[in-house]
Amino acid sequence: MDKPARPRKGPYEVEVEEGRTYVWCSCGLSATQPWCDGAHKGTAFEPITFVAPISEVFFMCGCKATENPPYCFGNCTGNASRNKS
């Protein structure tokens, strides 16, 4: 598997809490999208860990084609950035 699975065309709208650590799925195989559940094991993909800088609704990439993971910038939909981070 050299390209990630694309579980969704478009973002996952999620509420994050300032200071909390999140682990975003980069392989697209997780059953708990957009978060990692360990399904990447045995692939070349690694999840992306980040700490939320603010409590806010974030748009997390669902197509796994973002140029700035884990955030959605509309790469799959042609839309402009929606994330306020």
Image (cartoon, rainbow, N blue to C red):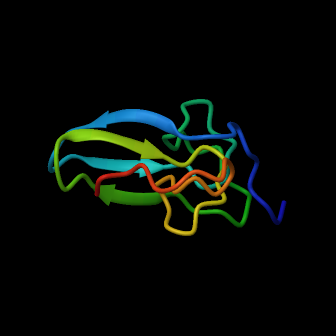
**Residue at image point 69% right, 40% down:** 9
**Residue at image point 57% right, 69% down:** 67
Residue 53, image x, y percentages: 19, 56
Nearer-the-camera pick, 46 or 16: 16
Q: Image quadrant of residue 11?
A: top right
- Up the image or down, 5 lies above or below 13; here it is below
**Residue at image point 38% right, 33% down:** 14
- The image quadrant where one finds the C terminus is bottom left
**Residue at image point 47% right, 46% down:** 60
**Given the current orientation, which residue lies at the most extreme right position?**
1
- Up the image or down, 71 lies above or below 32; here it is below
Count of numbered tags: 0
Residue 80, image x, y percentages: 51, 55
Residue 57, image x, y percentages: 30, 37
- The image quadrant where one finds the N terminus is bottom right
Is 66 placed left or right of 5 in the picture? left
Q: Image quadrant of residue 8?
A: top right
Is 19 placed left or right of 68 in the picture? left
Residue 18, image x, y percentages: 15, 46
